[in-house]
Image (tube, rainbow, N blue to C red):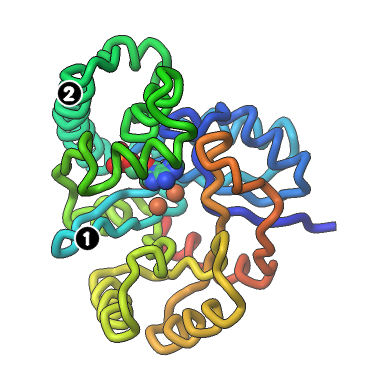
Amino acid sequence: MAGKIDLHIHTTASDGTLTSEAAVAAARAAGISTLAVTDHDTVAGVAAAQAAGERLGVEVFSGIELSADRQGVDVHILGYGVDVENEGLGQALDWVIVERRARNERIAAGMRADGVAVTIPALEAAYPGATLGRPHFARVLVEQGRAESVADAFGRWLNRGRPYYQPRVRLTLEQAIAAICGAGGIAVLAHPLQYRFDQARLRDLVAETAQMGVSGMEIYYTGYSAQQREMLHALAREFGLLVTGGSDFHGDNKPDIHLGALAVPEDILPPLRTKLMEVRK
Ligand code: AMP
Ligand code: ZN
Ligand code: FE
Ligand code: FE
């Protein structure tokens, strides 16, 4: 029997709390048979997840979630089927990492000025190989009693407008989409309702990303209602976009999101597979 589908999860390669291997094992235990690992700005967790998938009988698509700037809004683009060794993608990610490091140094300096004990080398030692970002600073704040939980740490300290927030330079939408397509992948607009756009702006975003080469939209997503999905489906049909779905599982960094809880219908897979074959040259 075919199992469940989850095309959006994070591992310790970015800001999830399970390693690739543990995430694949947990997915299998939750009845998932098709998974995509979509860490923020890195493909470092993909190979190990695919190896674990082979052992455990879980199909694992390679994936990534890129943060892109659209007029000051952080829009996320998922990439499926990317070649993790692609040079152009690697160069784009290297640039992102340099920008992230500079920003992490600014966040850490702000926290230290407030008496929080945090350094980048210490974080790198605590989270080897991870794409360090605000979630890791959030954990430090929890560990040092400055916040009750990761979510509370964001709300008090790390969200935009809060004391430790620092902007970071992001890829443009065009660059993010080009990096994914150039690596033989397909680009998908992630969680379209997270940007809190009104209907007109959402439609603009979908039109613009479709124009730039995005070929799908994430419609099944933790917390989206049937009515919201129907509205997104209508947009996907209008712009000829594939439909995808994933939970955005992060382990304990988003403790309310559980593997296997999101229903993603099987009929999204055949068109996705066809498209993946088409773009893989
Ligand atoms: P950064 O990329 O360093 O700016 O961190 C942003 C990431 O933090 C997002 O992609 C989310 O995965 C995570 N994040 C944002 N808000 C929260 C929250 N309230 N609780 C847990 N994780 C969050
Ligand atoms: Zn995340
Ligand atoms: Fe996202
Ligand atoms: Fe995500």
- Residue 134 shown left or right of residue 251 in the figure: left
> Is the C-beta separation of discs 1 and 2 under 8 Å?
no
Q: Which mark is residue 253?
A: none
- Residue 132 shown left or right of residue 218 in the figure: left
The residue where tag 1 is placed is 73
The residue where tag 2 is placed is 105
Q: Quadrant of the C terminus?
A: bottom left
| Mark 2 surroundings: few (<14), some (14-19) or many (≥20) residues within 10 A | some
- Residue 281 can be seen in this image: no
Mark 1 element type:
strand
State the residue at coordinates (24%, 70%): 212
Mark 2 element type:
helix
Residue 106 locus on image (x, y percent): 14, 27
159 vs 51: above or below: below
Which quadrant does ligand 1 occupy? top left
- Residue 61 shown left or right of residue 239 in the figure: right
69 vs 257: above or below: below
Kind of residue at badge 1: Val
Is ligand 3 closer than 8 angstroms to the Cβ of mark 1? no
Along the line of sight, which residue is nearer the eye, 17 or 264?
Answer: 17
State the residue at coordinates (44%, 25%): 142
Residue 108 locus on image (x, y percent): 22, 22
State the residue at coordinates (41%, 61%): 190
C-alpha distance separating marks 1 and 2 = 22 Å
Q: Mark 1 or 2 closer to N-term?
A: 1
Q: Which corner quadrant of the image does residue 127 belong to?
A: top left
Please state the total of marks drawn on the protein image: 2
Kind of residue at badge 2: Glu
| Mark 1 surroundings: few (<14), some (14-19) or many (≥20) residues within 10 A | few
State the residue at coordinates (40%, 18%): 144
130 vs 254: above or below: above
- Residue 73 shown left or right of residue 206 in the figure: left
